[in-house]
Amino acid sequence: MQAGSTSNPNLGNADQTAVRKRILDAALSAFMAGGFAATSTIEIATRAHVSKRDLYALVGNKREILAACIRARATRLQVSPDLPIPRDRKTLARALIAFGTQLLREVSDPTVVAVFRLAIAEAVRAPEVAQMLESIGRGTARAALTGILAQARSDGLLGGRVNDMADKFAGLLWGNLMVSLLLRVADRPSPREIARRAREATDAFLNLFPQPGEPTPNERAEMPAPPRRRAPKG
């Protein structure tokens, strides 16, 4: 059954939006409490205080509900229209810092981390959780980042393969933070810490990937040192 195909005619658009949000919130709570595989649509409807008919009409079956939960968060990982347009290395740095800040802020949200834990816990019984998280959630963030890097490469601001650069930037940005959050051995970073991580990751990334024609860090390290000037006698 397609979501929204037989929506309740007694509900206006605003009411439908509110009920849909209530269903998604209830579903996420139920998935976290009992797991995706063990949660029924009846339980979700009961938690959301809606009929099963309205649940299917406004969102869909259980798989569609999970996808909607993930998609609702994934929209926050799209490139912001306020993101600086990279015209030189300076504005590229600003764009990467802004995107890195956005990514850290949204993905380190406790609800998002809980969805990652759910995907791990349900990897055997319900592998579709991880598959949807990868394609909808992580895929959105990956597409946004590679879009920024591909445009910068096309404009001659970066040299390197886009996918390799995306992997390196993500690694510099996250380090071991996500693993620590999943294991509950670290708290969510503060806005100040998030800004620092984004800035330092961007600085390190741009040092690793200079403009075409400029030496890489390894090439600079292999360059002979300039001859030392002798002090004048007398």
Image (cartoon, rainbow, N blue to C red):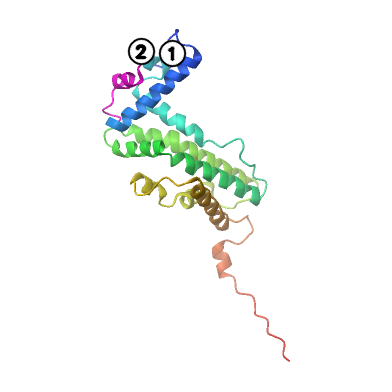
Instruction: Pick the residue in front: 161 or 17.
Output: 17
In the depicted structure, whether residue 33 falls above or below residue 181 = above
**From mark 2 to mark 1, how far is it between C-alphas?**
11 Å
Is residue 63 rendered magenta in the image? no
Query: Residue 198: horizontal and vertical position, in percent?
Result: 52, 49
Query: Residue 39: horizontal and vertical position, in percent?
Result: 28, 26
In the depicted structure, whether residue 96 falls above or below residue 28 = below
The residue depicted at 64 percent of the width and 75 percent of the height is 226
The residue depicted at 54 percent of the width and 64 percent of the height is 218
* Numbered tag placed on residue 5 in the rendering: 1
Residue type (three-letter) at the residue carrying disc 2: Arg
Locate residue 228 relative to residue 54 in the image: left or right.
right
Disc 1 crowd, CA 10 A, few/some/many (<14, 14-19, 20+): few
**N-term mark: 2 or 1:** 1
Query: Residue 61: horizontal and vertical position, in percent?
Result: 35, 20
Q: Which label sits in the foreground, 2 or 1?
A: 2
Residue 35 shows in the view: no
Locate residue 228 relative to residue 181 in the image: left or right.
right
- What is the span of residues highlighted in magenta in the rendered image? 36-49
* Residue placed under numbered mark 2 in the picture: 53
The residue depicted at 46 percent of the width and 16 percent of the height is 16
Instruction: Pick the residue in front: 156 or 110.
Output: 110
Query: Residue 163: horizontal and vertical position, in percent?
Result: 50, 46
Residue 54 shows in the view: yes
